[in-house]
Image (cartoon, helix red, strand yellow):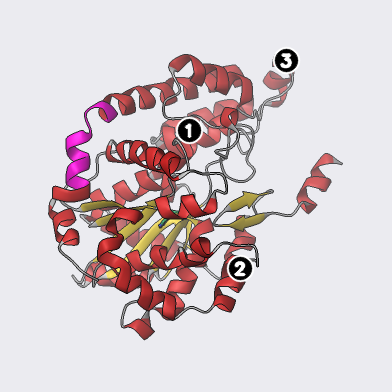
Amino acid sequence: MEESHRTKETFNVTPWEVSGPVDYDKLLHQFGVKRLDHILLSRVKKLSGERLHPMIRRNFVYAHRDLDLILNDYESGKGFFIYTGRGPSGPMHIGHLVPLLFNKWLQDTFDLNLHIQVTDDEKFVYKQDAKWEDIDHHTKQNLIDIAALGFNPDKTFIFRDSEYIKNTYPLLLKIAKKITLSTARATFGFQNETNLGLTFYPVYQIATTFFEEKRCLVPCAIDQDPYFRMQRDIAESLGFKKTATLYSKFLPSLTGTYGKMSSSLADTAIWLDDDEKKVKNKINKYAFSGGQATVEEHRRMGGNPEVDVSFQWLKILFEPSDPKLRVIEHDYHTGKLLTGELKQILIERVNSFLIAHREKRKRTEKELDRYMYSGKLAKQMWGKQF
Ligand code: TRP
């Protein structure tokens, strides 16, 4: 009963809202993007020296636009650059790190320039009750968290929109002039009540794809596709290349595999500043379990790793070894591993990751300055007028 009811439930994926049980196959058709097929995967694998990142190996990064053109450009020596972003609406949780970590892997593996756009403007105009001072505070804190991930200081440019606008405004205007209100409305669902700030914001998210002459690849979660669809419609008329994209699914929230981890429900996310006790309590209390109601039943019938959030988090983020993950999956599926034991594995992984992250965060100030202003790419970008 419950199940059949659920499968009929609708889902909705927009850049500002993800709700319901996302059908990732349907999304491919809805958005008109391609699945990452075996041919492309094996090309990426070969170019990466046979070391695919777990997220892409395990089908979490699963869709794209024009990835084949990117690989052609890489093979022919033309090269490409990557770009991703973060909306600093509040403090960061583990889900926010997913695209950033994947970008770091791409940067390291293919030795790429990476631009990280921090959209203080977007979050200010989007959040009705946000004061500029709040967004400014979150932006500064988020920048430190991002810098702590350890990107290549000579090849990474991290910028906040409101500051770098000095260099980009003419480019923004050229883009804005190509997009009518009715197109923006159809793409983003803008209403009569939508404020002008939000209707203008998309031109900035598009502009970053034009920061270099090489073709751009945007690795991000699939909810950002509307921006890049729009980019591809106008890029060539402005003398630029259409951007390529590489899309991931969403990291499930602790409480279930629906939607993406929400910032508004504090307990269903693990925040980067959650201490060890909090992490332990939250995972034990909230992490949705694919196990049986009693130990006896679990031993007899086994658990379901597909819906178990602890297992999914290990698969996506915290257990890079395939053989080890297979053992965990098998043991859970056959009932040898109990839910409490599976959670314990995750608790340890999350805590050791967060402890290391907070240590790095303390020593990040100098690096942040390089990413934003004084590193090789940053300097180059501040010297550019678009
Ligand atoms: N709009 C994104 C957010 O709300 C931030 C962002 C800007 C972004 N540019 C991007 C995300 C490029 C992915 C790729 O979080």
Q: Nearer the viewer, residue 108 or 372?
A: 372
Measured along the vertical axis of the image, is residue 163 above or below residue 229?
A: above
Task: Specify the quadrant of the image occupied by residue 174.
Answer: bottom left
Read off the residue under disc 3.
296
Q: Dominant secondary structure of the magenta stretch?
A: helix
Q: Is residue 164 left or right of residue 195?
A: left
Pointer 3 residue Cβ closer than 8 Å to ligand 1: no
Q: Amino acid at mark 1?
A: Leu
Determine which of the numbered discs, if any, sits on residue 314 in the image: 1
Q: Viewer-nearest of labels 3 and 1?
A: 1
Name the secondary structure under disc 1: helix
Is the residue at mark 2 in contact range of ligand 1, meaning its CB lies under 8 Å from it?
Answer: no
Q: Does residue 152 appear in the picture of this structure?
A: no
- The C terminus is located in which quarter? bottom left
Q: Position of residue 1 (x, y in %)?
A: 87, 41
Q: Which residues are magenta?
A: 361-371
Residue type at mark 2 is His
Q: Is residue 124 magenta?
A: no
